Amino acid sequence: MFKSLAVVGATGAVGRIMCRLLESSSEQFQEYRFLASARSVGRTIEFRGRNYPVLELCPKNLQGIDLVVSSTPDDVARDFIPKAVELGCVVVDESAAWRMDPNVPLVIPEVNPHAAFRHRGIIASPNCSTTQMVVALKPLHDFGRVRRVVVSTYQAASGAGLGGTHDLIEGTKAALEGREYACTTFAHPLAFNLIPQIGSPKQQGYTSEELKMVFETHKILEDDSIRICPTCVRVPVANCHSEAVLVETERKITAEKARELFAAFPGMVVVDDLNAKHYPMPKDCSERDEVFVGRIREDLSSPNGITFWCVSDNLRKGAATNAVQIVELLQRGEPAVKR
């Protein structure tokens, strides 16, 4: 059992959600600390009826802490996390800094909880677009063994942080008023537009965001043989990522069976009635912790293909919720047993 918990990046968009989730969590700690960058020092955070000062992120303020949950930029995570581990902290990290380190487990509690207990002081939480897809892939993989995935993402402005949301809102106002708007986060206007690039250019014409989906999925499912072809697109939606996913499996999965598998899997909700116009949409999934699936149907072009639409709140299950669920998993001390 861990006695003390520190939230790093507590004043950021994801950090604030982490604090709310921890406040309502059944898992409790004897001591809490809230850390952020120097510019947030002096602020206070109200948590479980008390006001806590925001402390600067530095080794001194992590002394005596058992468990850390962190949401920071990648460069900050690379710098402070090894120092925290040296102080005896176990760190659950939401950034991309440690995800592909072979000594760091990459964990989605519904999918591979056993991996969390292999840690050497650091546990990573996956990329938001990876997380919701892999939650949906897991029951299909367990039943029919996934061999190939083609996925197109429709990623919300909030995935690029507060600046991304600002670009969407202010850019939309400017477009409606016929004014020019200088983007601060995106390379192109997002209002009334789609941007088919998320992340930096990488090999073979793929972006860093797309390759995260490939390599993180392999690591979480412990199967490098799955072929994955992703295309990541930024869309003018404030919150919640959506994905169109086509899956080919070794064992045929009918649409009826897929609905059954999804409905029985923890953390998933099926909303799938085309005749009634019921399917997951970002406006209905925001501020929810589940992964929603709908438009479930068999692939007309492949005998063992199944395709579906998937929506999840990228700031919650895609980031804060998953990290807090790892904290709760560690605090419960559940045995390292595969599903």
Image: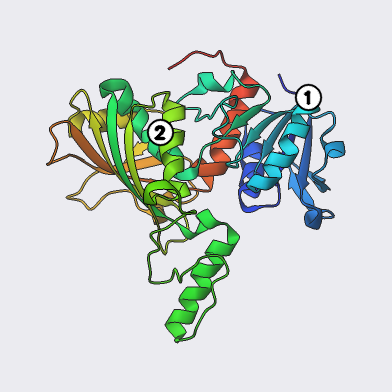
Tell me if I can see residue 146 in this picture. yes
Q: Position of residue 136 (x, y in %)?
A: 36, 34
Image side of residue 240 versus residue 66, left or right:
left
Pointer 1 and pointer 2: residues touching (CB < 8 Å)?
Answer: no
The amino acid on which the numbered mark 1 sits, given as a three-letter code, is Gly
Image side of residue 187 versus residue 78, left or right:
left
Which residue is most to the bottom? 178
Q: Residue at x 59, y 27 (%)?
A: 104
Residues packed near mark 1 inside 10 Å, few (<14), some (14 to 19) or many (20 plus):
some
Depth order, front residue of 314/146: 146
As drawn, the label of residue 88 is 1
Q: Is residue 103 above or below residue 50?
A: above
Give the distance between the C-alpha atoms of the residues marked 1 and 2, in whole angstroms. 31 Å
Tell me if I can see residue 290 in this picture. no
The amino acid on which the numbered mark 2 sits, given as a three-letter code, is Val
Q: Position of residue 60 (x, y in %)?
A: 87, 37
The part of the image, by quadrant, that contains residue 150 is top left
Q: Position of residue 124 (x, y in %)?
A: 58, 33
Q: Position of residue 296 (x, y in %)?
A: 23, 40
Question: Which residue has dot 2 on it?
Answer: 135
Q: Quadrant of the C terminus?
A: top left
